[in-house]
Amino acid sequence: MAKTAAQLAQENTALRAQLTPANKTYYESLMVYIRSQAVGKDELAVEQELLAILTDILAAQQDGRTAEAYFGKNPQETAGDILAALPNKWRDLLNLVLYAGGACILLMALPMMIDPAKPVDVGAALFIAAYCLIIIVLLSRLFGQSRYGRPLSDRTANWLLIGFLLPGILFGLLMKTAWRFYFPGVGGIILIFAFLLIVGIVFWRKEKKNWKDSLIFLVPMNAIIGIIQRIPAGNRYFNRTPNGRYVILAVFGVLFIVYYILVWWFSRRHRSR
């Protein structure tokens, strides 16, 4: 069975521990640069090439040769040659764009799922997704380039990322576009089920499933509350009685605690095995 890009990256991480300090510095500079500049390239081909290079360096290391002596070039020149030879795969970039847009629309749809009176602003969600994607790609390239100049620390890179992302996200949350849609009644219920189906498919396709992720609880709970609010009897009780909203909050809180107790219990049981 062919290995995925994620599996190859894990194998890469394990093998890097065998490198000498000098070879590790050379290889990791090359690796970071290639990964940060490989937007639009075939991700699987990138990881296969990186693993092949690492294997060659380890073989040369056993013969007493350094990585730089083996390649005869500095890591930036080596990385440039490798990137030029790697095949393009714009479908991976398109998938990244679709995931980013879908994630933003989903997060902005959570309030709508609970309250039928709140709209989903698709235009604002797409703006946030596009803005975040551009900033992440640009800063990733900057971080990769910095490996050969004045290196940016991880802490500096993270602060730069937060500093550039926050203004765009806040602006997107405040903006109102013409693409605002309301989903009351049956239409809202159908949309909620569609959201649950999409989230479920994405989650089950992930190689590593983090059951501690709060979204695993929040999305289904919001969906259940949203469906109840769109049923006439549920809407009358929760929105037109004095204690309706408090009942929702209380049930939500209890289920949240129960969920994390179950996560803790299953995690402990798994560790004991």
Image (tube, rainbow, N blue to C red):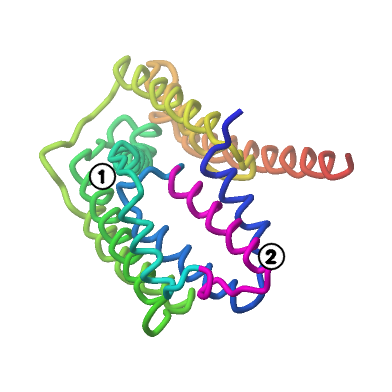
- In what element is the residue under mark 2? loop
Q: Residue at x 69, y 43 (%)?
A: 260
Within the magenta stretch, is there residue 127?
A: no
Whole-percent x, y for residue 197 in the image: 45, 22
Q: In the figure, is residue 97 to the left or right of 270?
A: left
Disc 1: which residue: 125
- Residues 176 and 10: in front is 10
Alpha carbon distance from label 1 to label 2: 42 Å
Residue situated in front as seen by the camera: 202 or 137: 137
**Amino acid type, residue under disc 1 in the picture:** Ala
**For mark 2, what is the residue?**
17
In the displayed structure, 164 sits above or below 210; it is below
- x%, y% of residue 27? 53, 68
Disc 1 crowd, CA 10 A, few/some/many (<14, 14-19, 20+): many
Q: Is residue 75 above or below residue 124?
A: below
State whether residue 111 appears in this view: no
The mark lying in front, picked from 1 and 2, is 2
The answer to whether residue 109 shows anywhere in this view is yes
The residue at the point 40 percent across, 33 percent down is: 114
**Is residue 64 toward the left or the right of residue 51 in the image?**
right
Indicate the amino acid at tag 2.
Ala
**Chain part drawn in magenta:** 45-70
Residue 52 inside the magenta-drawn segment: yes
Indicate the position of residue 233 as horizontal and vertical percent values. 42, 16
Q: Residue at x 34, y 63 (%)?
A: 80
Q: Residues within 10 Å of mark 2 (few under 14, many from 20)?
A: few
